[in-house]
Image (cartoon, rainbow, N blue to C red):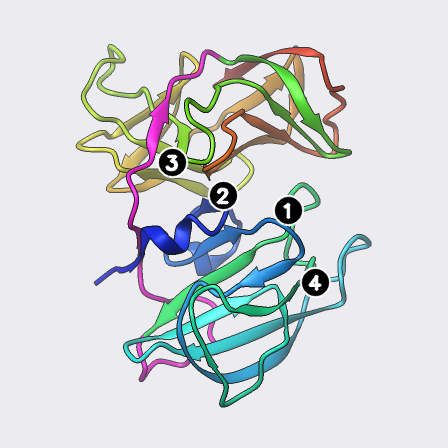
């Protein structure tokens, strides 16, 4: 049975994603990444701290050598939290919103991924140190799908990413939105198709949140994958920005902004530049 992360918890973060990761812990939406403002981590759970543990991270020139695991007994499950240097200790009690510590930029991150809290849940009798096999997670909010035609202007940019100003968030700060799946049937029509989540196509698969009965996954006029329930298998596609190939698109659910995010080592787009994104099968 899925563990629901409630609305009041999710709204403490400006962004969340269940599928935008290459790691097994996120397989079939069994973990969620929560993106807070600032460099501190508010706790998404309440309970007793069972243990804090240093974890060796993959070596990356832009990342810390070590990560950290925090285990919290919520009374019903054991919560696994990563990417936070803990300011809490074993035996302490935390409530939702309490400061857990400083966010860690770990070697598990791709260079375009912002700092965040990784959260998963395991049964009390399960091995809490294993990364895979946690319980499925659902979210206690309805994420609004936003149509996108593949165009926009660069609103923010870094060395390995660029966020466009389109699609535009209809009411920043008030609710979560994401890029809509416009799959439907082969004619491109259908009912509630949901919101896309994940790294297209640079991670093995993605997710479809809130969709009803859709198997065909498409947006910006192109079919990009197939959904089995809420889990998506990407087709063999390449993403282009103004005709140049990029690693892909980072798809997530956002509270404050909604623009499409292009990622990759070769992203060379400047703020104010107009961009047309195309996807080729």
The reply to whether discs 2 and 1 touch (Cβ–Cβ < 8 Å) is yes
**Mark toward the start of the polypeptide (1 vs 3):** 1
Visible residue check, residue 200: no
Comparing labels 4 and 2, the label whose residue is closer to the camera: 2
What's the distance in space between the residues labelled 2 and 1, CA to CA?
Answer: 10 Å
Checking the image for residue 58, the label placed there is 4
SS at mark 1 in the image:
loop
Checking the image for residue 175, the label placed there is 3
What's the distance in space between the residues labelled 4 and 3, CA to CA?
Answer: 35 Å
Q: Is residue 122 left or right of residue 101?
A: left
Checking the image for residue 114, the label placed there is 1
Task: Count the marks.
Answer: 4
Q: Which residues are magenta?
A: 123-149
SS at mark 2 in the image:
strand
SS at mark 3 in the image:
loop
What's the distance in space between the residues labelled 4 and 2, CA to CA?
Answer: 24 Å
Q: Residues within 10 Å of mark 4 (few under 14, many from 20)?
A: some
């Amino acid at each position: 049975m899925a563990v629901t992360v409630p609305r009041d918890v999710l709204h403490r973060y400006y962004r969340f994603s269940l599928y935008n990761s290459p790691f097994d812990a996120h397989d079939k939406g069994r973990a969620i990444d929560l993106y807070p403002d600032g460099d501190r981590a508010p706790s998404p759970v309440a309970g007793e701290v069972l243990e804090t543990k240093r974890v060796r991270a993959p070596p990356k020139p832009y990342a810390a050598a070590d990560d950290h695991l925090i285990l919290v007994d919520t009374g019903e499950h054991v919560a696994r939290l990563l990417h936070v240097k803990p300011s809490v200790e074993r035996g302490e009690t935390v409530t939702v919103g309490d400061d857990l510590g400083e966010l860690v930029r770990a070697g598990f991150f791709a260079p375009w991924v912002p700092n965040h809290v990784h959260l998963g849940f395991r049964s009390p009798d399960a091995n809490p140190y294993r990364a895979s096999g946690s319980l499925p997670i659902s979210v206690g909010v309805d994420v609004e799908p936003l149509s996108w035609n593949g165009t926009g202007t660069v609103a923010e940019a870094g060395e390995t990413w660029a966020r466009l100003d389109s699609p535009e968030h209809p009411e920043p700060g008030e609710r979560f939105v994401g890029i809509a799946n416009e799959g439907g049937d082969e004619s491109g029509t259908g009912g509630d198709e949901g919101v896309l989540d994940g790294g297209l196509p640079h991670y093995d698969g993605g997710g479809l949140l809130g969709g009803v009965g859709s198997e065909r996954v498409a947006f910006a006029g192109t079919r990009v994958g197939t959904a089995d329930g809420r889990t998506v298998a990407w087709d063999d596609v390449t993403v282009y920005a103004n005709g140049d190939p990029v690693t892909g698109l980072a798809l997530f659910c956002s509270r404050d902004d909604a623009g499409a995010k292009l990622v990759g080592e070769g992203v060379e787009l400047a703020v104010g530049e107009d961009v047309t994104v195309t996807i080729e099968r």
